[in-house]
Image (cartoon, rainbow, N blue to C red):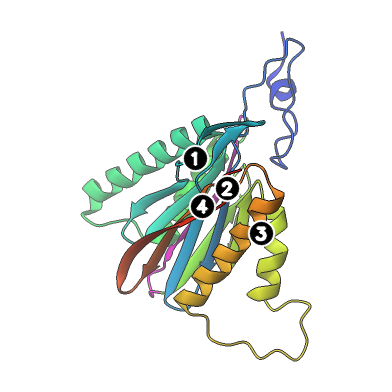
Amino acid sequence: MVGLNSIVGNISGADTMKETPSGFSPYADNGGTIVAVAGDDFVVIASDTRLSVGYSIYTRGQSKLFKLSSKTVLGCSGCWCDTLSLTRLLEARMQMYLHDNNKQMSTPAVAQLLSTLLYYKRFFPYYVSNILAGLDSEGKGAIYSYDPVGHCEMSNYHAGGSAGALLQPLLDNQLGFKNMQNVTPEPLTIEKAVNIIKDAFIGATERDIYTGDGIHINVISQDGFNEEFFPLRKD
């Protein structure tokens, strides 16, 4: 009998999948990229719309963003069946909280809940890359990124998924102003954040076969919730 550790393999890096001698693996990587940028009073999160495995494209129109409340959006990429299982469980827990407390769960509370749910499954982790974006209790933009077992890090920008390693250095340069000299940072606006995200995805599409077709963009601000679609190359 093959043990669970042999089946799961080294999942901590979310890059490798170990198969059993029969060739079976409980995980499949369906690709996709998530990018989020937070400002003083807004947050922008975007995902591509390609769902694929290997060189086969299942669909070109599947968003990987899940609106959890009027101020919180979760972006998930990776194994699509794990994505659906995790998001449905998270939405159910938030619905229970709403019925018990007569109010929506705040973004920091959702971040903690998601971390707990991921840690609960640490011995057979969800094979997904998660980025949670929203407005905190003070109305400021907040972004939370996770590893497969629930470790959480809060930041002002983050890229995850199949092209995350390609896009993170770009965000470090354009938003974190790292490795730049004699630069005076200007206040980040929604328009600038959206343009940087579009440019990042255009570049990722040229280098990553699992990213493409289009970008689904969600903007959360004090003025409300807005959605936008931006097409990408389809080859």
Task: Give yes or no for residue 115 being in the magenta stretch.
Answer: no
C-alpha gap between disc 4 and disc 2 = 10 Å
Above or below for 209 versus 112:
above
Q: Dot 3, crowdedness within 10 Å: few (<14), some or many (≥20)?
A: some
Give the residue at mark 1: 60
Q: Residue at x 53, y 62 (%)?
A: 36
Q: Amino acid at mark 2?
A: Gly
Q: Toward the viewer: 103 or 52?
A: 52
C-alpha gap between disc 2 and disc 3 = 10 Å
Above or below for 112 versus 173:
above
Q: Amino acid at mark 4?
A: Ser
Local SS, label 3: helix
Q: Quadrant of residue 21?
A: top right
How far across and how far down the image is residue 133, in percent? 47, 60
Q: Amino acid at mark 3?
A: Gly
Q: Earlier in the sequence, mark 4 or mark 3?
A: 4
Left or right? Give the position of 77 relative to 25: left
Local SS, label 4: strand
Q: Dot 1, crowdedness within 10 Å: few (<14), some or many (≥20)?
A: some
Give the residue at mark 2: 212
